[in-house]
């Protein structure tokens, strides 16, 4: 993540820092660890009383990001934040505040949660608001909400919104009404009647057109009446017809021809809509009007052929794909070819475009004209798979081959599986090198798995069966990319295949030692899932896993032990599988959670969410049972020979406010309450001593004052006890500066006549570190704290106690910041200025 904070769109520095730590994590597991730690921090923050709206809003945004960004772990129970989200939706001062509260509830709150009633009440209030923004926000929430209680509660007010004067309100009201009452035929019919009387098509949401097929006749009528008049109205009708999935009235075909002829410069979304609607008209109708008007729609976009702009290239090839090839390719005598030979060559060159969508659309167009063109293209690409290609280049070449395969064998799954095996025999064959040295082409794995999932169930099983057959053939060479694909498919479809799971297990076990550890990991997980389908795991499979364990690293050894353990406990494995979807990542996640749960059960510890039990009584140390102490023994305090030594130690402890110390202001979140410590951490010696010594703190202080004339033995005995609390106790105030903390804003405003500013090629943290070298008192206020939020504030006290320098630092990017300095003392001002200019 190389984007600076000012350009990142992050809500706060904390948000930016979290995203940065997650994106720069060394692994997915490390990223999840960062996110889980942040969730615990947010939990502690939201438990504080009197939480300001700003802190609540930022915490909810961070928590929403954490919940969405987790990969292999679960965020756990987030109900601690639900009432904060509902309160923010209710009490938010701005539309953004309320939107954050609503969005959090919509994304994370269960549909039938008890707090949904409060959310419905808030929605009713916003619907009755005089603010158009609040009404629109409430309607947008109603479109997405899944609660059963909301429909009867807002029905009356929603019907009034259907007739509102504001177009934005009416448009959202139509969608909300359909979302809540689409299962009621009477309500749908009432909405359809209402939409047919709407004069402006722009107000009708396009996604409601599917609900009303009779709207097609109305919109086609609007299109005929509009003619070539209002461009905005025509474009709105075209968009509504297209997005509604409705057919164009053939009588409007000449009008579409006219729109293409006169409004294709510059190409816009309206041109795409026009060509898309032509695809709903029979090809003979288009040919008939082409002959009558002596004009082809393809001629209206031929000027885009030589364009170097990717957007215009995409518009051209997409529009061409909507037309029947017989109307422009010259395959029929009555329809001559529209494009010249050089123009056809330019179209073929689009196969080499860097844009994947343009390449796919071009393949589709060329295949519809002549399938042999795509077959020749495929043959040429296979010859380009050479051993010297880099991983990226080889992966790109294979992806292009897969595009061509999908175009040629869209409906024939068996042929697709056969051609896919042949392709990987070329890409990962003997010529390419040893199996363990070949890389996994991740993009190809995703493409094949998506192709399988997008097919219907019958085609899916046929395709998976055709791919897995080589696993049972012990002499077949299978490379790492194809093996990862097979592992994922075996895990997902092993119970539905006509192939024996035992044979598949044997084939995978024999090939284990050939692959790199990353592929072995996927194989072992897939084999573990497959073992649940076998009544008994074959001995040669168990032996192959044990042999791998002896020569593998620690991670794979752990995976081998996992296989050996669970493959013998088939009932546990079946229980784990029943809890998870069938995909390989879901199986791994459920397996990991099960193991973590087993560890927690076998070694129970008090969870961090439980609040630690407070001390009920403050008794001396002598009455505490030794076997209940939860801290390790600490060294006996050193004897102090006199009161001066004891006082000097206290002076050293209190010298944190001496020159060179930086006092950073803690964030104010409405309360100074410190969040409870985690229950796993043991009670420290200092804490336990404080608890035991609370009764005699005051008497100890009086005794200490009378020790000046006492004997050394009595002094040593007493100071050994007092010294235990001297460094920890907040009640000892020797040599502590009792002056109040200076107010930064007051100091800044009082020095308006001493202004300096400049740019420094260093970060704010570096500047603060350099200022510490001055050995002066400093106070640093974080950027997210008032005053002047968004800037780091530094207050430096000079040698005269009443002279201050106030410095404001604003990050410009990661390599510098803007600084502003005010200081009435010339010497101090010039000293700080020189330091900043040297960096």
Image: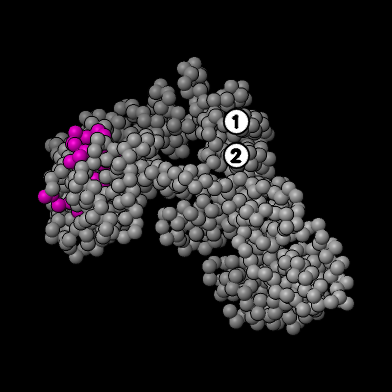
Q: Where residue 493 appears, x then y in whole percent?
A: 27, 37
Q: Is residue 333 left or right of residue 562?
A: left
Is residue 485 located in the magenta-colored stretch of the structure? yes
Q: Where residue 529 appears, x then y in whole percent?
A: 30, 41
Q: Residue at x 77, y 79 (%)?
A: 641
Q: Where residue 432 appears, x then y in whole percent?
A: 16, 60
In the figure, 573 relative to 430: above or below? above
Q: Residue at x 55, y 61 (%)?
A: 6
Please identify the dominant SS of the magenta region: helix
How is colour applied across the structure in the image?
Answer: one colour
The residue indicated by pointer 1 is 114
Q: Where residue 210 appears, x then y in whole percent?
A: 41, 27
Q: Is residue 801 visible?
A: no
Q: Quarter of the image holding residue 819?
A: bottom right
Q: Residue at x 73, y 80 (%)?
A: 828
Is residue 24 located in the magenta-colored stretch of the structure? no
Q: Residue at x 62, y 29 (%)?
A: 117
Residue numbers of the magenta segment: 475-503
Please state which of residues 188 and 479 is positioned toward the viewer in this rendering. Answer: 479
The residue indicated by pointer 2 is 82
């Amino acid at each position: 993540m190389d984007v600076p904070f000012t350009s990142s769109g992050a809500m706060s520095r904390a948000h930016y820092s979290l995203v940065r730590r997650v994106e720069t994590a060394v692994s997915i597991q490390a990223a999840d660890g960062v996110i889980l730690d942040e969730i615990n921090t947010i939990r502690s923050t939201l438990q504080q009383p009197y939480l300001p709206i700003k802190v609540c809003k930022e915490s909810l945004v961070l928590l929403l990001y954490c919940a969405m960004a987790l990969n292999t772990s679960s965020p756990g129970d987030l109900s601690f934040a639900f009432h904060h989200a509902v309160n923010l939706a209710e009490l938010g001062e701005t539309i953004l505040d309320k939107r954050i509260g609503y969005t959090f509830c919509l994304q994370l709150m269960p549909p039938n949660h008890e707090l949904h009633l409060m959310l419905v009440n808030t929605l009713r209030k916003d619907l009755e608001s005089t603010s158009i923004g609040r009404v629109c926000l409430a309607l947008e929430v109603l479109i997405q909400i899944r609660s059963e209680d909301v429909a009867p509660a807002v029905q009356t007010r929603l019907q009034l919104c259907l007739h509102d004067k504001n177009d934005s309100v009416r448009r959202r009201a139509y969608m909300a009404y359909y979302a809540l009452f689409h299962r009621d035929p009477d309500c749908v019919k009432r909405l359809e009647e209402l939409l047919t009387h709407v004069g402006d098509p722009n107000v009708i949401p396009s996604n409601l057109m599917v609900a009303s097929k009779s709207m097609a006749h109305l919109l086609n009528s609007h299109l005929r009446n509009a003619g070539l008049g209002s461009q905005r109205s025509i474009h709105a009708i075209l968009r509504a017809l297209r997005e509604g999935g409705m057919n164009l009235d053939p009588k409007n075909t000449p009008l579409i021809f006219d729109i293409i002829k006169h409004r294709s410069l510059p190409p816009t979304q309206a041109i795409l809509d026009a060509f898309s609607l032509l695809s709903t008209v029979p090809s003979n109708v288009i040919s008939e009007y082409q002959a009558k008007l002596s004009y082809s729609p393809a001629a209206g976009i031929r000027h885009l052929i030589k364009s170097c702009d990717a957007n215009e290239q995409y518009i051209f090839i997409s529009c061409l794909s909507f037309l029947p090839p017989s109307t422009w390719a010259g395959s029929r005598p009555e329809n001559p070819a529209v494009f010249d030979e050089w123009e056809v060559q330019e179209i073929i060159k689009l196969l080499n475009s860097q844009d994947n969508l343009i390449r796919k659309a071009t393949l589709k167009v060329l295949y519809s004209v002549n399938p042999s063109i795509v077959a020749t293209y495929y043959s040429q690409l296979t010859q380009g798979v050479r051993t010297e290609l880099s991983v990226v280049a080889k992966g790109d070449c294979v992806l292009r081959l897969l595009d061509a395969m999908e175009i040629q064998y869209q409906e024939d799954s068996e042929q697709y599986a056969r051609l896919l095996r042949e392709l990987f025999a070329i890409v990962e064959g003997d010529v390419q090198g040893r199996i363990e040295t070949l890389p996994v082409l991740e993009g190809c794995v995703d493409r094949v798995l998506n192709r399988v999932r997008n097919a219907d169930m019958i085609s899916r099983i046929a395709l998976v069966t055709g791919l897995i057959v080589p696993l049972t053939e012990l002499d077949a060479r299978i490379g790492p990319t194809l093996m990862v694909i097979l592992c994922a498919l075996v895990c997902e479809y092993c119970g539905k295949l006509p192939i024996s799971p035992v044979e598949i297990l044997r084939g995978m076990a024999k090939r284990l030692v050939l692959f790199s550890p990353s592929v072995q990991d996927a194989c072992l997980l897939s084999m573990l899932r497959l073992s649940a389908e076998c009544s008994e795991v074959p001995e040669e499979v168990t032996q192959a896993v044990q042999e791998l364990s002896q020569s593998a690293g620690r991670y794979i050894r752990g995976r081998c032990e996992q296989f050996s353990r669970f493959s013998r406990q088939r009932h546990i494995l079946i229980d784990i599988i029943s809890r998870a979807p069938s995909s390989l990542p879901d199986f791994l996640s459920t397996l990991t959670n099960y193991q973590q749960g087993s560890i927690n059960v076998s070694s129970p510890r008090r969870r961090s969410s439980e609040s630690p039990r407070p001390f009920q009584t403050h008794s001396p140390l002598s009455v505490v049972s030794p076997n209940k102490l939860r801290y390790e023994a600490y060294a006996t305090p050193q004897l102090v020979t006199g009161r001066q030594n004891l006082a000097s130690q206290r002076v050293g402890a209190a010298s944190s406010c001496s020159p060179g110390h930086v006092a950073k202001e803690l964030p104010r979140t409405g309360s100074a309450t410190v969040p409870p410590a985690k229950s796993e951490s043991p009670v420290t010696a200092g804490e336990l001593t404080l608890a035991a010594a609370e009764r005699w703190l005051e008497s100890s202080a009086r005794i200490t004052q009378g020790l000046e004339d006492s004997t050394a033995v009595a002094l040593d005995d007493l100071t050994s006890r007092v010294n235990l609390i001297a460094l920890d106790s907040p009640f000892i105030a020797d040599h502590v500066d009792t002056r109040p903390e200076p107010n930064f804003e007051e100091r800044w405003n009082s020095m308006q006549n001493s202004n300096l500013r400049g740019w420094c090629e260093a970060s704010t943290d570096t500047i603060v570190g350099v200022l510490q070298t001055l050995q002066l008192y400093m106070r640093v206020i974080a950027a997210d704290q008032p005053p002047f939020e968004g800037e780091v504030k530094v207050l430096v006290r000079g040698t005269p106690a009443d002279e201050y320098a106030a410095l404001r630092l604003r990050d410009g990017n990661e390599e510098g910041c803007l600084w502003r300095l005010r200081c009435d003392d010339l010497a101090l001002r010039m000293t700080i200025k020189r330091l900043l200019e040297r960096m």
